[in-house]
Amino acid sequence: MTSLLRLITRPRRPAGAIRESQPIAYLFVLPYVVMFSVFIVIPVIAAIYLSFTYFDTVRSPLWVGFENYVNILTNDEVFMQNVIPNTLKFAVIVGPGGYILSFLLAWMLAQLPAKLRTVLALIIYSPSLTAGVTMGVVWKVMFAGDNTGYLNSILLKLGLIVEPVIWLQSQEFLLTIMVVVTLWSSMGVGFLAMLAGILNVNQELYEAGYIDGIRNKFQEMIYITIPTIKPQMLFGAVMAIVGTFSASSIGVALSGSNPTPQYAGQLIVNHIEWYGFIKYEMGYAAALSVVLLLIVYAFSRLAYGLFGSKNE
Amino acid sequence: MKTPTLRKKKSRFQATKINPKRFHPSQVRYLLFLIPLSLFMLLPLVYILNHAFKPLDELFYYPPRFFVTNPTLDNFRRLFELTGASGIPMSRYLFNSVVVTVLVLFFSVLISTMAGFALSKLHFRSKKIINEINTIALMFVGVAVSIPRYLVVEKLGLIDNFFVHVLPYLALPVGLFLVKQFIDQIPNELLDASRVDGANEWQIYTKIILPLIKPAVATIIILSFQAVWNSADTSQTYINDDTMKTFAFYMGTLTNNTNGVAGQGMGAAASLIMFVPNLVIFILMQSNVMDTMAHSGIK
């Protein structure tokens, strides 16, 4: 529908006399471009530059070439043994897991009448209204390490454990808890976009599909819904990737320390902050930042490959 | 619109219909999954709601009880009476948060709708490249560059400046992206007609574009609100002066302190204060948001 509207409107545009450049346009974009440059573009460029230097914030940056990157690959035991496996585990479960879950939920919600759908969608979306700080209170009590914690108290009562488990300091459970907590609040903007997309699929497409031999809801979803809402699927995927990595500092929030106990919940974001704000090795931290941005970019390209349209 | 009789004849299609008009038994299978899941999603919120209203003795119950039996406002009263580390009353943090949030909402709406208008409807040379960079920036993960960002803020002399709470939130690539897509739907003929009538671009922006893109504005409001109201980052990283920190930051300190169980009650009360505005704004604007999201696709 959107693309159709565009097709209709686009060719007419050059017809008017306003094809030539309108200087006033620069005034309209200027405030955004300035803010965007200062807080997004320049920090990214600075990160790239600093990643090739040794910088301790006291003396000016010293050019070291690829040394930081070489060290990441060969010298950083914590990075290779804890951070990368943790980040991958976390990202693979929360990213695609949360994404597929939010698509399926959006799809199911679309099968319901409007009022019921709105209420349920609101409930499912509500945890992502307040990520981070607000929820720290809840999770810290739910998973409190003594027997006043809800989880401990329930498990003790059921006789599944003999003594309280110190969940948030435990090497075994911290990462799992992080995954659960993040999944819980991962039905965000992407979920809403996919829901809106599914609701706007032209009904006639389905009717035509049934005439052409689609038999059930599953085929309907695979052959009609998903191809039709590809642009929203892509938007949702990008949001899921960004959301996953943005939320990934949660281990430190939950356990209350950086590094997390025995590096159990140490993800790449925490590793960056540890090197940057605690060890003051800014150059090395910047190299890690660049690695993270590249990881996010690679995942996004993958999503573009899956859902992007090549002709535009 | 189909009449009920028609719908009965086409009952096979009814069962496979997206966005049905009314309840149909075939929907039960989805509800069997969605309702338990919704209850699970609600758990933490129900918990905050109950915990916030628990009197002190109920907070100390062992084993802990989920639901409150004698609700009281004690936690809120103690929260408001409590003063921060250096004798700063809680109301100060709340005031800071409100001011910061209002400033962010106003300016981020202004900046992104202006840019969205230019990028969608005006002609200038760098338009295409700005659009492309902004679409790439959708993938931008802010936490990745928290350190260089800190260095930039420091270089600009913004450390301990109140506006450092506001400025980083003004460029919101997702917001601009959604606004631009939304403005793309407005037919150019409408704008050309007003140009013929002598309207300048600023008038077109204020008189035609802004009234037509209310849903997109509502969406930026929600996204910006969630980003700024809930964040303790700027207080943590850029502000040393306690009188300038925000409520979200203060909340974090509440639960980290040694207040123990009583602190949990206050923490829950504070969480509720944090959460309710999010919920109210979203409920008020949800239909607008869904309108905007229909145009959210990346081509």
Image: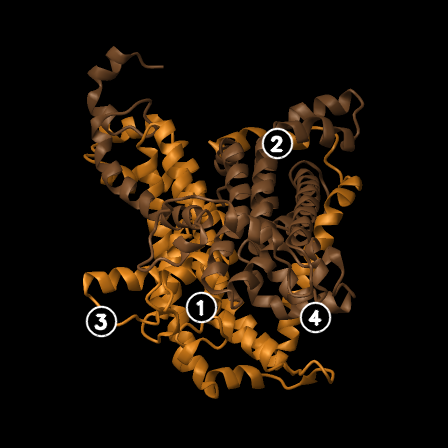
Residue indicated by mark 1? A251
Q: Residue sitting at 64 percent across and 59 percent down?
A: B83
Front disc: 1 or 2:
1
**In this picture, is A67 found above or below B191?**
below
Query: Which amino acid lies under the numbered mark 4 shown in the image of this protein?
Result: Leu
How many C-alpha atoms fall within 10 Å of the one at disc 2: few (<14), some, or many (≥20)? some
Query: Which amino acid lies under the numbered mark 2 shown in the image of this protein?
Result: Ile
- Picture coordinates of residue A64 (x, y %)? 64, 86
Q: Nearer the viewer, residue B19 or A13?
A: B19
Image marks 4 and 3: residues in contact by CB distance under 8 Å? no
Residue indicated by mark 4? B151
Query: Which amino acid lies under the numbered mark 1 shown in the image of this protein?
Result: Gly
Residue indicated by mark 2? B213
Real-space CA distance between mark 1 and mark 2, rounded to the nearest whole angstrom:
39 Å
Tell me the shade of chain B. Answer: brown
Real-space CA distance between mark 3 and mark 1, rounded to the nearest whole angstrom:
26 Å
Q: Residue sitting at 48 percent across and 72 percent down?
A: A268
